[in-house]
Structures are given as structure tokens and as C-alpha cells.
Amino acid sequence: MRRADFPQDFLWGVSTSAFQIEGAVREDGRGPSVWDTFCATPGKIADGANADIACDHYHRWESDLELLSGLGAGAYRFSVAWPRVCPQGAAPVNAAGLDFYDRLVDRLCAAGIEPVCTLYHWDTPQPLEDAGGWLNRETAYRFAEYAAVVGARLADRVGKWIPLNEPMVETLYGYATGEYAPGRTLLFGALPAACHQHLAHGLAVGALRAAGARAVGTANNHSPIWALGDSPADHAAAGVLDALINRLFSDPVLLGSYPEELLPYLPEGYAEDLPVIAAPLDFYGVNYYEPQGAAAPSPGSPLPFDLPPIEGYPRTNNDSPIVPDGLREFLVALRERVGPTLPPVYLTENGCSGVDEPDADGRIADEHRIAFLDAHLRALREAMDAGVDVRGYLVWSLLDNFEWSKGYAPRFGLVHVDYASQRRTPKDSYHWLRGFLGGRE
């Protein structure tokens, strides 16, 4: 693929998240988050790792932005750490935390890079989790207050706003299965957390617009669901899984409704919030990594589906099947299902993990990532040719970083981070993307 294969005003960039790169978890007034607590719980994180230092981006952000500028990216999607700005979840505001993001945004604007600000990437302030977290409806109102604070400071310069990143992951991994913070294992009892995150999204959209935000959207993780079997039970299982990981998170925002299959699990009065949740958006963000297989549940399963692995495709070292055409498949299906009211789409995350260690000469030859990005750009172009209005593509991620419960083993970055020395080394994929963005690929 070449940059010329996309519109001239197509937005190219990279994404990161605060907890995964910043470190400095006890500095300048930052309070504890649910992920700090989760990391401190024995057995939760591979190798007992934590994000106390991570990529030390809090101290090294200026040199990291030089890497970003050198890449030629037009946009940088970052997240604000909620507990750094509002350690208790709302007032009082920690001025030092807000000042950090103010400086970051100023420097991005000076470099001609559009700031794309995510307000929440799973780092709930621990005091709010102690009061019930996303199972407590009041958390949505605290989030709206926090959104108003950040919006008041940054809305004059931030180009695009994303209130919440991947509420599906927070709901299902954090509250249903317990693989992620806060570690609850409620299965379908976790679904009120989805409703309250949706309400938080809608309230934040209003708060950001009141603060003068130019464009507000979202970033949902989506996967095409493949029935791995031909029986009616297999297809029924795939339908439930599609409702749970896709439609539960797209439909309230885009269509003002929840999937029929899941209504029995939603909290009383959920429908009353839908007008707030479905406030019109300026763009719809899709994070895509892989499709998901589904099959009829095994006897005695507590879930109405099994999750067999998708075979026959290469896999990342994070054990994800690499299926570029799944991106085209999902985007075209979304456009057909939602219709002409679908806002412009941005790929707000897409990337792959690898081992990615330097060779004897210090080079990181991550050809697998170059092939991954090129193939997904082809799939994206095919979706656009099929009528999907895609306006931008952001790679996950600028830096290798803390990869949640899997610690530091999966490396997603265009830039290698030696965690002992914090030395940054651009990988071959960084140089490839720089050439692509400069029109040399």
C-alpha cells in the first residue's frame, strides 16, 4: 500500500494509554487506580510485573514526542489518567496532573500533530471502585464532572475527544471474568457496568460539547464473530456472543437501543438513559485486532457459548489470529446494519504484538509488524471501496508498554523500549511507516 491510495486529508497517527506508559504512579499528587491495586495483588500479572515505572513517559514525554514527530504522524491519541487529575474521582482537582496534559497538548500543537484525547482507558480511581465502581450508577456522574474539568482546560486545542476506551473490555474482562482490574467475576451480572459506562459516555459528550469540544466520538473494540460449526446451536451461540461484545457497545450509542438478547441482564430503568447515551457523534472509533470464534456451549458451561480458537491463520505472540480481512468484514457489516446514520469511522487502534528483541547490531527487524500493517491497510482500503466512510488510521502503539495482565512480554510498539535502561530504539516498522507517511513506500 501507498499513502497515495488514501485521501489526501486522511488522518494518520498512533495511540497510547496513560497507565501503560506513564509510570510515576505516586508522583505529583496522582492517586491510586484500580490497576495499581490489581497489580499489587499476587498472581494477577504475569511475572508479578506492575506499571510503577512502565515506559517512564511522565518524565520522558518530550523525547517521546520527538519520536512521534520524526515518524511524520498527523495525530497522537493519548489518554488522560483519571486519578492523576482527580485522585478521588471528582473534586478536588490535582492541578499538577492537569498541568502535565496541558504541556503535552501544547507541544503536540506546536509540532503540528493533532491531539486525540481519550478520557478513560480503564484506570478508575480506587476510591470510586471502593464505592462500587462501574456497578454504581453514580460513577457515571463523577466521570462527567471529570470530563468537564479536562474539557475546560484542553478543549480549545484538542482536535478529537474519546470519552471511554473499549467499555467492552472493562465490562467483560474487568467485571465478568476477572482477568483485568478490578477483578470481579460476575459473568452476566457484569452487564450493569456496561450500561453505566454508556451513561458516562453520554454525559461526557454533553460536558465536552459545553466546554467547546470540536469533535467527540468513541473507541469500541470490535470483532467479527464466526460460528465454528454448522449447527443451529453454533449459530445461536455466535449471535449471543455478537450481542455481548459488539452490539451491546455499538447499538446504544449508534441506534439508541440495546440487543434484545441481553435485556434481562440490564439494570432497571436502563432505557431512560438511552436519549443521553445516543447523543449524535462526530466520529465512530473502531479498535480492531482479531475475529472471535463461537460454538454451542459444552455441557455444564455457565455461558451460552464456547470460545474455540480460530485455526488456520498465523498468530501473534499474544496468541491472536492474524486475519486482516476481518477488519473489512466488520466495517462493511457495521455500515450495512447502521445505515447512513453511521458517523465517519476512524480506526483508533490496530496493531500486533511480537517478541521484537534487538539483534547483535541493535536492529529490531519486526517484518511481521510491517506485513501486519500493510495487510490491514489493504483491508481498510477495501472497506472504503465498499462504501464505508473511513477518515483515519491510528497504529497501536507508539511504544512497547505494560500489556495489562500479561505484563511486559507482548511488545506492540513501533519503538522498542529497554525497560531496564528506558532506552528507545525505533524498529524497522517505525522506519517503514515513516517512509509510508512520507510517500516513499
Image (tube, rainbow, N blue to C red):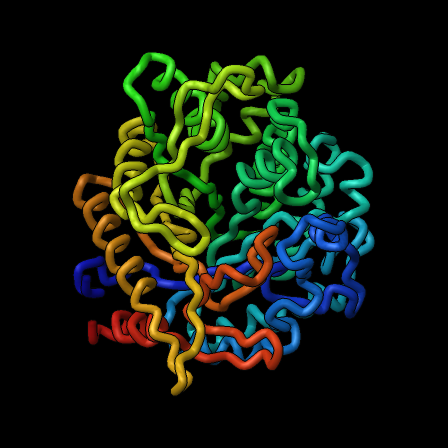
Residue 34, image x and y in percent? 73, 48
**Residue at image point 57% right, 54% down:** 406
Q: Is residue 251 visible?
A: no
Depth check, front residue: 424 or 136: 424
Residue 315, image x and y in percent? 36, 51
Q: How many marks?
A: 0
Residue 105, image x and y in percent? 56, 68
**Residue at image point 49% right, 32% down:** 249
Q: Is residue 161 visible?
A: yes
Is residue 114 found left or right of 420 in the rendered image? left
Depth check, front residue: 235 or 63: 235
Residue 402, image x and y in percent? 58, 61
Name the residue at the front extreme.
299
**Residue at image point 42% right, 52% down:** 348
Q: Is residue 401 above or below residue 289?
A: below
* Quarter placement of the N terminus: bottom left
Q: Is residue 280 above or below residue 49?
A: above
Quadrant of residue 265 within the rendered picture? top right
Is residue 430 found left or right of 243 in the rendered image? left
* Quarter placement of the C terminus: bottom left
**Residue at image point 60% right, 35% down:** 171
